Image: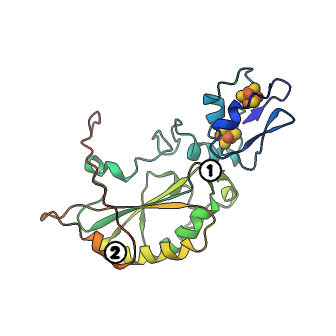
């Protein structure tokens, strides 16, 4: 993103909407810190710039990778899915990705206001790949894992995005190992992350994964979501 300094009137509307505080007024002119900017396009779309000073230039590789991880209205070119490129796990009632005996796991790294470097993904994936998790194939993060060891493609590691979601599934007996890895990375990472777990209700309505999470020291807040898939064709 670029601001034409000779056109900006210093109204500050773009400063207020930027989710990562990348825009500042300097001598009453808006200036973007390109190191912080995640190319989410919010300033371009929502600042209602009175002088049309905000310009969206064509991005080059590797910087262009910032946009699909940060722009909520973009459709991801690799997965063809709008809204940062992933179905996420909550649609399991229609996608049926996680069966009985399987646990779906998502780790969303970064949030609005904080963001993350893509290198933070590797803190998890290099450890998770050792225990043989099955990454979701239609996921933007899976697309940037370079090898079976969980390394992220070298040329994009330093790129900064709003957030990135690692998605995978494991047999339920592997879940304790996953949770211990998450505790380990918690001590190393320099941003926030959110852990999501999906499992099916058993036929007697019990949810065994809750006990596993409690035993590993995780406070559980069960959240049932029923997605009936209206508007979807399978
Ligand atoms: S909204 Fe436009 S005019 Fe106002 S500070 Fe930002 S770039 Fe300048
Ligand atoms: S594109 Fe997004 S991150 Fe970059 S300056 Fe605009 S609002 Fe901020």
Ligand 2, seen in the image, is in the quarter at top right
Expressed as whole percent of the image width and height from the top left, the position of residue 130 reads: 49, 76
For label 2, the SS is: helix
User: Dot 2, crowdedness within 10 Å: few (<14), some or many (≥20)?
Assistant: few
Secondary structure of the residue carrying tag 1 is strand
Please say which color scheme the image uses: rainbow
How far across and down, in percent of the image, does residue 215 sit?
A: 34, 79
Q: Which residue is mark 1?
A: 161
Q: Quadrant of residue 33?
A: top right
Q: CA distance from mark 1 to mark 2?
A: 32 Å
Percent coordinates x, y for residue 214 in the rendering: 34, 75
Marks 1 and 2 close (CB-CB < 8 Å):
no
Residue visible at 76% across and 45% down? 34
* Image quadrant occupied by the C terminus: top left
Q: Which residue is mark 2?
A: 214
Residue at image coords 66%, 30%: 44
Residue placed at 54% from the left, 36% from the top? 74
Residue drawn at point x = 62 percent, y = 40 percent: 40
Name the residue nearer the viewer: 206 or 61.
206
For this view, does 224 lie left or right of residue 10? left
The label number, if any, that marks residue 212 in the structure image: none
User: Is any atom of residue 80 visible in this view?
Assistant: yes
């Amino acid at each position: 993103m670029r601001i034409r300094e000779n056109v900006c009137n210093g109204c500050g509307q773009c400063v207020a909407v930027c989710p990562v505080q990348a825009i500042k007024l300097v001598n009453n002119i808006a200036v973007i810190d390109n190191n912080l900017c995640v190319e989410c396009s919010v300033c371009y779309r929502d600042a209602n710039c009175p002088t049309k000073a905000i310009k969206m230039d064509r991005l080059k590789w590797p910087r262009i990778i910032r946009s699909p991880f940060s722009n909520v209205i973009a459709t991801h070119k690799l997965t063809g899915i709008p809204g940062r490129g992933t179905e996420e796990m909550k649609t399991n009632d229609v996608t049926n990705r996680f069966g009985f005996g399987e646990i779906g796991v998502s780790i969303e790294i970064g949030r609005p206001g904080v963001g993350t470097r893509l290198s933070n993904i590797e803190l998890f994936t290099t450890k998770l790949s050792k225990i043989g998790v099955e990454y979701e194939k239609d996921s933007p993060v899976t697309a940037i894992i370079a090898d079976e060891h969980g390394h992220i493609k070298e040329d994009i590691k330093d790129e900064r995005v709003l957030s990135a979601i690692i998605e995978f599934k494991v047999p339920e007996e592997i879940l304790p190992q996953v949770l211990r890895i998450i505790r380990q990375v918690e001590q190393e990472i320099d941003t926030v992350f959110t852990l999501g777990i999906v499992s099916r209700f058993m036929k007697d309505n019990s949810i065994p994964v809750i006990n596993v999470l409690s035993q590993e020291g995780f406070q559980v807040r069960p959240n049932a979501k029923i997605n009936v898939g209206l508007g979807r064709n399978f």
